[in-house]
Amino acid sequence: MSNSLDQAKNITKQYEALKREISKVIVGQEEVVNELLVSLFSGGHSLLIGVPGLAKTLLVNTLAQALGLSFNRIQFTPDLMPSDITGSEILDQNRAFTFVKGPVFANVVLADEINRTPPKTQAALLEAMQEKSVTVGGKRMPLPDPFFVLATQNPIEQEGTYALPEAQLDRFMFNIMVDYPSEQEERDIVTRTTGTTSASISQVLSESDIIAIRQLIRDVPVADNVVAYAVGLARKTRPNYSDNTLATNYLSWGAGPRAGQYLVTGAKCYGLLQGKLSPDIEDVKAIAHPVLRHRILRNYKAEADGLGVDDIINQLMG
């Protein structure tokens, strides 16, 4: 028990140090940073939703630096091909085929505006996210460990975009909303970015540290009532499959079993980062919004009554 307590305290210290490093570059966005770290330590991928100019790319790059991870950014466009992501075989000077790795071969991959590329290219990223590998020329190429995909979407411009299929959305552990900064935060951003000084990011963790934390999260015990609450919450979102009138009245479909898995895993990580040896129901509630908001679909009645996805999740949690 004392060893577990020491490990939890150590992770909490590393977590706080990591947030301090990130805050040297990123002003505010504490909730976004927390959710990103929970997703990364849990071994999950995240979808970041926000208008342009909110420093999503800078945040992901800064996070990669503080974690000591390799980082690649892919700008998704309508003409992007699967090989532009995974890499391809080329004929070298010795008339032999050599595989040239694509940008997906990094610890942290930022898929910028992922919904601007056709489904065939999206599917190539889907394989990498799920299998942690790519297949080129019939050969399986493992990706670095750890491997995280952080994808962005612009919620405003939808013309010329390809909506992500539900199967691909479900691969993302979190759907993170990146909102505008407060007035004071915006002043700080303008002051920092219009001067001559620039912050230097120090590495807080290593690849092996992240893998160790990920394993420790797996080992965290969970009480039966916490698992029951997480599973029950996911089931409440399913119209016609639960006795919850809210889902029947306002949702077209709900979350699948993967939602319950992510609710429990995310709660274990969230609780551990707060120094807890086992998560409670409040930890499940703390990460319920990013887990569920892209797994449930509102119907026309919900839109007519002005109920947003987060409003419905709030009511489902009670």
Image (cartoon, rainbow, N blue to C red):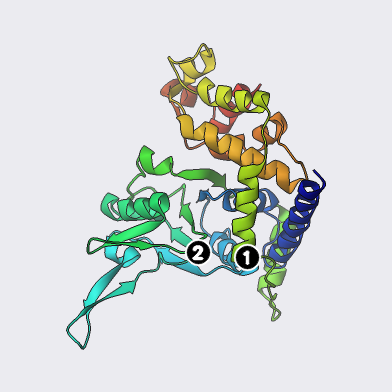
Q: Which residue is mark 2?
A: 107
Q: Secondary structure at mark 2?
A: loop
Instruction: Find residue 33 and report its horizontal and vertical position in percent.
Output: 65, 53
> Which residue is at the far right?
2
Q: Amino acid at mark 2?
A: Asn
Residue 21, image x and y in percent? 72, 66
Q: Are marks 2 and 1 in contact (CB under 8 Å)?
A: yes
Task: Work out whether 278 lies above or below 187.
Answer: above
Q: Say above or below: 13 vs 84.
A: above
Q: Which residue is mark 1?
A: 67
Q: How many marks?
A: 2
Secondary structure type for disc 1: helix
Residue type beneath disc 1: Leu
* Quadrant assignment, res 201: bottom right
Residue at left offset 54%, top offset 44%: 174
Which disc is residue 1 wearing?
A: none
Please say if 191 is above or below 12: below
Residue at far bottom of view: 93
Residue at 70% x, 71% y: name it.
192
Crowd class of label 2 (few under 14; some 14 to 19; many from 20; radius 10 Å): some
Upstream in sequence: badge 2 or badge 1: 1
User: Is residue 81 among what the camera can see?
Assistant: no
Image position, residue 300 (x, y; %): 42, 23
Question: Residue 19 placed where, x, y %?
Answer: 72, 59
Residue at x-position 69% and y-position 36%: 283
Say whether residue 126 is left or right of residue 272. left
Alpha-carbon neighbours of circle 1 within 10 Å: few (<14), some, or many (≥20)? many
Work out whether 28 lies above or below 245.
below
- Between 163 and 107, the one nearer to me in the picture: 107
The foreground one among 190 and 168 is 168
